[in-house]
Image (cartoon, grey):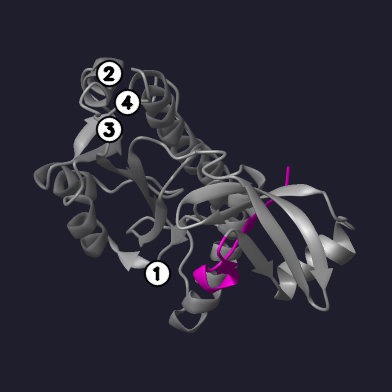
Amino acid sequence: MYNFFIKENQKQNDRYLISGADFNHIKNVLRMIVGDRFLVSENGVSNLCEIESFESDIVIAIIIEENYNDTTLPIKIHLFQGLPKADKMELIIQKTVELGVESIIPVEMSRCVVKVDDKKKKSKQQRWQTISESAAKQSKRNIIPEIEEIVTYKQAIEQAQEMDLFLVPYESKNGMEDTKNALSQLRPGMTVGILIGPEGGFDEKEVRLAFENGGKIISLGKRILRTETAAITSVSMCMLHAEMYLGENK
């Protein structure tokens, strides 16, 4: 089932008036007709809708069932990602949005292979946001995760230390026991920051600074993971724990 994200001013009582690019996609690309159904996501809630009519350049869709598909995790995961090469960043965004992240914050770190020119940062962010929206639609998210501006490492630490739980996948002394203990602290409604090193890995000073500011060093297993694998694995572990132990009726 297709999913569309709309703005508040597109709703009138129990109907959505959909125009612009979404109208074109519904009518001319998908070739949907009266009676076809799709999801409309608004303010974190997805409603099941049915096409009532086509009026000029507007699709009128009536709400059949409210809050039809709640895909929101019981925790809010914020991924602080050390800047990798473009194709890897796009993969990280796509997959972690599918897994349930709330936001992704690209971070400039000392061992980043990639350096983004200041003039290109805004266009990069816009490109990444488009990928986030596409992944959100595909995975039936209730929101489009925000891809924030590229920040310095110091700025990332300042943001991450405000999280209820701040995780740093690195060389953990106690291995997966540290990971298990960290995940056991998760509770519904918590914010979780995950800091992932770039392709060149963490600088030891960066790890020390994260630890001194509340970061919990965890393990992702005995194998050495690429940055994109580490990001996906970290978010997956938090998602799985939240879905299994923190959801409704748990």
Q: Earlier in the sequence, mark 4 or mark 3?
A: 3
Residue 196 visible here: no
Task: Find the distance from the CA under tag 3 to the CA under tag 1.
Answer: 27 Å
Residue identified by numbered label 3: 188
Look at the numbered discs 2 and 4 and tell me whether their residues touch, using CB distance below 8 Å: no
Task: Find the distance from the CA under tag 4 to the CA under tag 3.
Answer: 23 Å
Residue identified by numbered label 1: 149
Task: Find the distance from the CA under tag 2 to the CA under tag 1.
Answer: 32 Å
Residue identified by numbered label 4: 219
Q: Position of residue 250 (x, y in %)?
A: 33, 17
Q: Earlier in the sequence, mark 4 or mark 1?
A: 1
Q: Quadrant of the N terminus?
A: top right
Q: Nearer the viewer, residue 204 or 94?
A: 94
Q: Which residue appears at 55% of the width and 71% of the height? A: 126
Question: In the drawing, what numbered circle is on residue 180?
Answer: 2
- Per the image, label 1 sits on a secondary structure element best described as loop
